[in-house]
């Protein structure tokens, strides 16, 4: 099984945005979106936003989505997202890329499949690159309160990395289809980001499953009122070694910086 290096999702873990003083936050901002985040928090509109660390773990498209509503309340514009990043703020150098987190179960393979741009052609099925979907194309009720992410809290020993990876692999295999279900297949969190977010959240004494549920609820609420682009970049995976099966209908690929979800059309 290929190692998973994924840059983040769509999902910002919605910790209360506290603990960052205005100057410290702005000093650490490396992009226009990060600077806007700091200004929103400084102006008292950061309730419900992720913590500064978790906000930075999201890809720019998700950052923009999370900021749109509080920025609008302050009359601030959200920078346009082009590609996988926005215009960098003139601050310090880029941090080193996160080490990819390895998923268990090396038996999952894509033998016989071919990567063809926006498609993965397998012997029995064709998978197409998932786009963000308008609400008119979503199943009835998926944005309602009864549609829950439903992750099980981690009950093992966090020092047992094998147990953590098994838990997160199962959780991730539920998270990806749920994101596709609410029309955000082009804005998913990577497994590596998922892995890091788990440790960051649990280190802070917050239950990861509960935090993810709160985030999922926030995304559903925003999806009801905020338009999303079908895609935020034109990049595509270059090799099937970057990909793995989530379930019979979904394949996920990543190159550390970008995450792609491929979905088989309904039979």
Image (cartoon, rainbow, N blue to C red):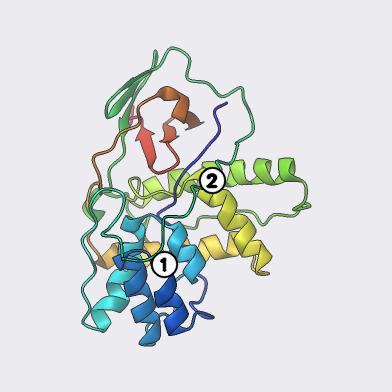
Mark 1 Cα-neighbour bin, 10 Å: few <14, some 14–19, many ≥20: some
**Frontmost residue, 248 versus 146:** 248
Q: Residue at (36%, 50%) from the top-left corner?
A: 187
Q: Which mark is residue 236?
A: none
| Image position of 68 with respect to 132: above or below | below
State the quadrant of the N terminus. top right
Q: CA distance from mark 2 to mark 1?
A: 22 Å
| Image position of 113 with respect to 38: above or below | above
**Frontmost residue, 197 versus 83:** 83
User: Judging from the image, what secondary structure is the residue with disc 1 in?
Assistant: helix
User: Judging from the image, what secondary structure is the residue with disc 2 in?
Assistant: helix
Residue 78 sits in quarter: bottom left
Q: Position of residue 25 (x, y in %)?
A: 44, 76
Residue 13 showing in the rendered view = no
Read off the residue under disc 1: 218
Q: Residue at (54%, 45%) from the top-left corner?
A: 192
Q: Residue at (53%, 21%) from the top-left corner?
A: 109
């Amino acid at each position: 099984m290929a190692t998973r290096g994924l840059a983040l999702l769509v999902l910002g873990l919605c910790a209360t945005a506290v603990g960052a003083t205005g100057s410290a936050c702005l000093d650490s901002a490396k992009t226009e979106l990060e600077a806007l985040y700091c200004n929103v928090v400084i102006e008292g509109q950061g309730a419900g936003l992720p913590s500064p660390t978790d906000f930075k773990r999201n890809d720019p498209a998700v950052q923009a989505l999370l900021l749109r509503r509080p920025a609008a309340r302050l009359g601030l514009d959200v920078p346009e997202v082009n590609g996988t990043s926005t215009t960098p703020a003139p601050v310090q150098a880029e941090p080193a890329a996160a080490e990819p987190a390895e998923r268990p179960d090396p038996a999952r393979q894509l033998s016989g499949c071919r990567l063809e741009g926006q498609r993965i052609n397998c012997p029995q099925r064709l998978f197409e690159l998932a786009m963000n979907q308008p609400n008119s194309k979503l199943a009835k009720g998926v944005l309602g309160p009864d549609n829950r992410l439903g992750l099980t809290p981690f009950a093992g020993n966090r020092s047992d990395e094998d147990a953590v990876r098994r838990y997160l692999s199962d959780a991730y295999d539920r998270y990806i289809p749920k994101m596709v279900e609410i029309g955000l297949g082009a804005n998913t969190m990577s497994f590596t980001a998922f892995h890091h977010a788990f440790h960051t959240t649990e280190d802070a004494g917050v239950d990861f499953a509960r935090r993810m549920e709160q985030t999922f609820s926030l995304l559903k609420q925003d999806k009801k009122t905020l338009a999303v682009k079908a895609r935020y970049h034109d990049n595509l995976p270059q090799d099937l070694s970057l990909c793995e099966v989530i379930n019979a209908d979904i394949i996920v690929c990543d190159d550390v910086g970008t995450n792609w979800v491929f979905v088989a059309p309904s039979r």
